[in-house]
């Protein structure tokens, strides 16, 4: 480790089954961490001994050790603390149960466990997904290839916010960049809350569930490894109805409920008996995020899509396209007034209607999904997306849009779908 003035260096001894927790709050701070001896992991990803890991603003980290270890932490002001009260033993037991089901599935050529992780906001759902997926590929020998499905449109762990995504996990997650991605399956939703278009949310979930089941059928390892599904934290009323839709669409057979007994009891009452429901405690380390923190995390996620991360930098392209050369659509038409609908008939199909829009300053800074569908006649809503571009300038006089894109020009000949998600490229 280098000797930077003003830094505090602490050697920390972690006893077995305990974890070191820290957050990086201020903008100009970096926390450096090194595993000196023993074995330790961050959310299921094993640390490399002697390697210096650096964490910047927004990082909320727990370094856990099953066997005990020695760590070195270096920061301006050390606010880390050690906790011996962790739910990791419960999470490991869950992994062992899933592993038994995978073995059974492997022997009988049946589907592995399809596991749904639910709970209110900020209880550690995404973290539990990461731990279980990491354990599956680390400890299940070389034979595990679980599918990770992320239905959390607010954060976007597989892709960017405003989408749902699925990917086959082959290797443990990197401490910084998440799971290495090979051809993720991504659907456009276009908002960061389910309330904005519940019909579209359910439609793309059904579509994704069909494709996930098809993928399982085409590969034995994937089939027996099963699926782990992350959800949003809206679990009451309409939110609960979405959860039951997910259970049906994905044919979920295990539900892990984090931290909420009421939700656990409702699910035990309402689910068919073959669906096993378990209640798990949340970790005391899970950090509650304010609205401002969430907005910042979303912007960072989109920035990472275009510019990469510290360990994997990307160089996006910026170029002009004529208004006449793009086909932009929005999903969802304005609601038809009740007076225009025949008596007794209720329809919410306008929510999944494809509407063509003209480029205008209204789309400045908006993200556009690049659909695999090339014409509006194809089922654009049910077609997955290839990637994203962002509108960085709209010149109405010259009728030209400036586009930020991960690929050089020209833009693919595809339908572009407008998202509510915005990104200001600075
Ligand atoms: N044991 C822990 N110690 C410290 N930080 C933790 C711990 N577990 C999780 N965190 C942090 O807490 C934050 C919230 O966790 P997570 O994203 O898993 O919650 P969530 O329930 O999925 O949230 P959301 O409601 O937004 O979907 C994350 O930044 C995560 O890194």
Image (tube, rainbow, N blue to C red):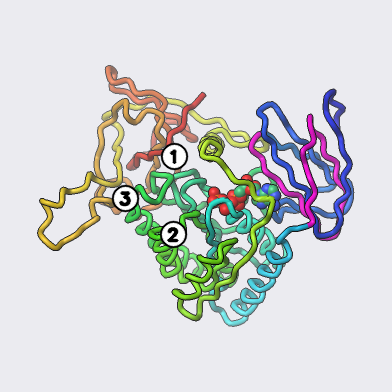
Q: Tag 2's secondary structure?
A: loop
Q: Is residue 218 above or below residue 357?
A: below
Residue visible at 85% across and 41% down? 72
Distance from the alpha carbon under mark 3 to that under mark 2: 31 Å
Whether 182 is among the magenta residues is no
Mark before the other along the chain sequence, 3 or 2 = 2
Residue position marked by numbered label 2 in the rendering: 236
- Report the quarter where the N terminus lies: top right
Residue visible at 67% across and 64% down? 136
Q: Is residue 391 above or below residue 22?
A: above
Residue 109 seen in the figure: yes
Residue position marked by numbered label 1 in the rendering: 388
Residue visible at 52% across and 73% down? 253
Magenta segment:
57-84
Distance from the alpha carbon under mark 2 to that under mark 1: 32 Å
For label 1, count other residues whose C-alpha is less than 10 Å away and answer few (under 14), some (14-19) or many (20+): many
Q: Which mark is residue 380?
A: 3
Q: Tag 3's secondary structure?
A: loop
Question: As drawn, which residue projects farthest toward the front?
Answer: 262
Tell me, yes or no, whether the two marked residues, 3 and 2, touch with CB atoms within 8 Å: no
Mark before the other along the chain sequence, 2 or 1 = 2
């Amino acid at each position: 480790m280098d000797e930077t003035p003003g830094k505090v260096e602490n050697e920390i001894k972690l006893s077995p089954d305990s974890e070191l927790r820290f957050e990086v709050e201020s903008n100009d701070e970096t926390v450096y961490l090194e595993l000196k001896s023993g074995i330790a992991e961050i959310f299921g990803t094993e640390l490399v001994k002697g390697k210096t890991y650096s964490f910047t603003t927004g990082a909320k980290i727990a370094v856990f050790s099953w066997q005990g270890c020695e760590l070195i932490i270096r920061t301006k002001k050390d606010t880390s603390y050690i906790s011996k009260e962790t739910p990791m033993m419960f999470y490991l037991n869950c992994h062992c149960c899933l592993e038994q089901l995978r073995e059974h599935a492997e022997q009988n050529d049946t589907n592995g466990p399809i596991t749904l992780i639910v709970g209110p906001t900020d209880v550690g759902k995404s973290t539990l997904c990461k731990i279980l997926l990491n354990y599956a590929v680390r400890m299940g020998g070389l034979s595990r290839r679980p599918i990770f499905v992320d239905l959390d449109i607010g954060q976007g762990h597989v892709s960017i916010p405003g989408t749902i995504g699925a990917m086959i996990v082959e290797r443990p997650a990197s401490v910084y960049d998440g799971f290495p991605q090979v051809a993720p399956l991504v659907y456009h939703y276009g908002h960061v809350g389910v309330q904005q278009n519940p019909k579209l949310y359910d439609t793309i979930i059904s579509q994704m569930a069909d494709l996930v089941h098809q993928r399982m059928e085409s590969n034995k390892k994937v089939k027996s490894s099963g699926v782990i599904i992350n959800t949003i934290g809206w679990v009451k009323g309409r939110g609960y109805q979405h959860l039951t839709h997910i259970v049906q669409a994905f044919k979920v057979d295990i539900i892990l409920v984090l931290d909420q007994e009421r939700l656990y009891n409702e699910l035990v009452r309402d689910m068919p008996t073959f669906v096993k429901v378990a209640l798990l405690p949340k970790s005391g380390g899970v950090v509650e995020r304010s609205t401002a923190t969430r907005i910042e995390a979303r912007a960072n996620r989109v920035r990472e899509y275009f510019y990469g991360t510290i360990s994997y930098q990307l160089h996006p392209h910026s170029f002009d396209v004529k208004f006449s050369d793009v086909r932009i659509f929005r999903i969802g038409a304005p609601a038809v007034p009740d007076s225009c609908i025949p008596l007794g008939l209720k329809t919410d199909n306008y929510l999944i209607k494809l509407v063509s829009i003209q480029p205008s300053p209204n789309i400045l800074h908006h993200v556009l999904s690049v659909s695999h569908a090339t014409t509006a006649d194809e089922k654009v809503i049910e077609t997955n997306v290839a990637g994203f571009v962002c509108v960085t300038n709209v010149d109405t006089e010259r009728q030209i849009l400036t586009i930020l894109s991960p690929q050089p020009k020209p833009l693919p000949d595809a339908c572009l779908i407008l998202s509510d998600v915005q990104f200001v490229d600075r």
